[in-house]
Amino acid sequence: MQTNSCPGTPCGQQTCLVIDACQFSPNYDYCFLDALVKQGQKMVFATTEFAHEYIPDVPGVKVFRCFFYLARFVNRLTRFRPLRRLLRAIEYPLDVLILFIYILLKRVKLVHFMWIVWPSFDWRLIKLLRFIGCRVVYTAHNPFPHELKQKHIKKYARIYHTVDHIIGLTNYTREQTVGQFEIPPEKVSVIPHGDFDALFSQYGFNRALAKKVRDKAADRKIIAFLGNIRPYKGLDYFIEALPLIKQRLPESFFLVAGSVLIGEEKNLKRKLTENCKPDELWADIRFLPVEDLKAYLAVTNVLVQPYVSASQSGNTAMAYAAGIPVISTNVGGLGEMTEDGKTGYVIAPEDPNAIAVAVAKCFTNNNYTKMSRNARKVADEQYSWEKIARQTVSAYQQALSSDKPGKKA
């Protein structure tokens, strides 16, 4: 098979099929596919409909929505999660069979998994794809699932050893896969997470929402936590920090917005009430449509990411593109995405006082202006999708030129 060895050019005009069966990362997927198409790549996207809002198709990308037809239909009738999970488990093998037939008919030679849905089943699929001559790339957004169980380690180790190439979004992920599983270093590329501007530019802007938040904040500095709420994100520590921030920065106002994926919304609201006065807080606990998320980014001064574990965060790149400094805990790969004192501050995890100190430092002297400017520069340079696409093409070329599929474990 001939491949084009020049970085940044199409991989021998091979079609690349990208799989995100559950739409775990719709914003990232859109920007990733858009960037690769602009580099001249031929892309097919195998996925399902995003459950929460309409995501437009990327121009130039063929979208094959082959996953979870029945579950999507039932979702329109009921929000009963156990039933939807059962239907997805039943459907998934059948959907994969349809996709496999498509790959055979279209003679696809490069398959890129964005996420692993069912580790033991997907591992067998990867082995089968390699047996028929496909090269397989896997993006390890995280080395393991956030809610890690011991059984995951062995299952993901098999996947890492079987695929032709791995893309990690931070050096931490590369170190984890290479160190824990004896993966050859040359098999893992570090390619960062870009911002979401390519997708966000397709949506409007909720100016009314932004005005309401600004009016309530009344010229106070808006300190925010944005995004889906799960235990690993450490939101409790940010909530505990709220009165400490007020002591150091009296002119502060707090914004907490996002949906609770794991945990109880009632407990979250109770903690917010206990730690913050109503006139000092804007809480919006729900899935955030893009128009609303853009409104919150427009009013946010500082983004706090008090995670207790993480390998990377798309919110960091998103904030930088908006000129927002980020306070991140030094866990996993999260700390390496923030330049301490330049684009924000890196602090110890599980320390509400450290959050308060860092927030106050953001507004000392002219720190804020400098960090905001630096954040935009980093977004333009380090997290540029054009750069990311070129690096991805190089990873594809490496996968296509790897040893003959079917010989690895």
Image: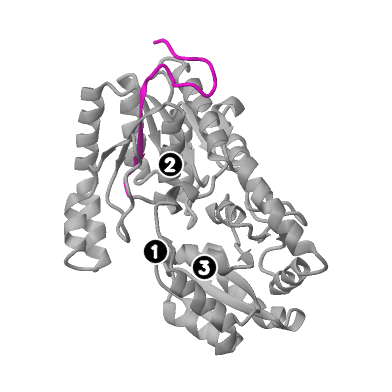
> Residue 155 has which mark?
2
Residue 341: x and y, percent?
Answer: 77, 57
**Quarter holding the C terminus?**
top left
**Quarter holding the N terminus?**
top left
- Residue ID for mark 1: 289
Prevailing SS of the magenta stretch = loop
Q: Is residue 382 visible?
A: no
Q: Is residue 159 visible?
A: yes
Q: Which residue is nearer to you in this view: 130 or 209?
A: 209
> Residue 310 has which mark?
none
**Mark 2 residue type:** Lys
Residue 289: x and y, percent?
Answer: 39, 64
Q: Nearer the viewer, mark 2 or mark 1?
A: 1
Work out whether 363 lies above or below 166. Answer: below
- Residue ID for mark 3: 296
**Mark 3 residue type:** Tyr
Residue 200: x and y, percent?
Answer: 45, 53
